[in-house]
Image (cartoon, helix red, strand yellow):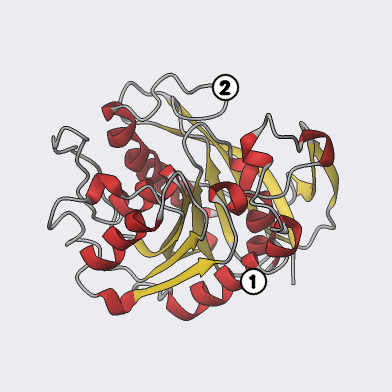
Amino acid sequence: MWFTGYRRLEATDGAGNRAIPVQLYYPTGTASVPTSFGPYVLEVSPEAPAAAGRFPLAVISHGGGGSPLLYRTLSTYLTRHGWAVACPRHPGNSLGDNALGESDETLASRPRHIHRVIDAMYADAALGGSLLPAVAVIGHSMGGYTALAVAGGVPWTRERRRIQTVTDDRVRALVLMAPAAAFFAPAGSLAGVTAPILLLTAEHDLITPAWQADIVQQGVPDPRRVTRRTIPNAGHFSFLSPFPPPMRNAGFPPSQDPPGFDREAFHRTLPAEILAWLQAHLAPAAG
């Protein structure tokens, strides 16, 4: 098992050359130390050299108006087990910068962000040569939409206008947590998504209810490649890393779960479940 190296990376959006900030986690042999990121404390090794070897790459796409740090439990767990993890902050649809919301521009730009971040990772002088030639995209809520779109899904607006998006054939596995999949409701929208999918839903999700997961399972060419599990008693935000106690209150919905749900206990098992599935389903491309 490795320690968690950390540094920042910046990709460039192909439209308007807008910066895409990326939090990059990677395996290192340098011991980690408690490091503050606003209200959160992570055990990381800032600017440490990467460990020797080759590593699979996961890109985590946050939910609408969210932040990469909301998935810090998963990011650091994967890194300690030998993965490089890129966590972009989607310009225009992130915490502190949500001017685009769920606009048509956001639907088009989010998949492009992932594509450009993957480009930046493989071009990175320090780490690019150590990355295996296959990528997993992990997405929560609108991040789930993003993962499906970059893997070949064809999204449509609520007015049934097709959105032109960028796809990336390096994406070979998807982990979808409470995905916003309504944009793929028209028949045939997911015909191009052939990557295996781990589809995790929450029993009491009022934001992306089970019918949206049904769109995924029924819309891909081979439903047998979808591993689906519903998390008992969970809510939409239960997939976010637990918040520090001072941030947990009824006025901050992302910190809240259905009565009786133990988010801390859930996040002691969720990363291991995702890692085991990825290890079984992500096959690097030849060459």
Which residue is disc 2 drawn over? 96
Where 123 falls versus 176 (above or below)?
A: above
Which residue is disc 1 drawn over? 272
Q: Left or right: 139 with respect to 244?
A: left
List x then y, in percent, for residue 24: 61, 46
List x then y, in percent, for residue 38: 76, 31
Q: Amino acid at mark 1?
A: Ala
Residue in view at x 27 percent, y 74 percent: 223
Q: Amino acid at mark 2?
A: Gly
List x then y, in percent, for residue 235: 56, 52
Among numbered discs 2 and 1, the one appearing first in the sequence:
2
List x then y, in percent, for residue 9: 57, 38
Q: CA distance from mark 2 to mark 1?
A: 31 Å
Where 195 falls versus 253 (above or below)?
A: below
Residue in view at x 64 percent, y 51 percent: 258
> Which element is circle 1 on?
helix
Residue 137 image-quadrant placement: bottom left
Where 99 falls versus 75 (above or below)?
A: above
The circle drawn on residue 13 is none
Mark 2 nearby-residue class (10 Å; few <14, some 14–19, many ≥20)? few
Residue in view at x 15 percent, y 50 percent: 186
Between 127 and 251, the one nearer to me in the picture: 251
One can see residue 119 in this view: yes
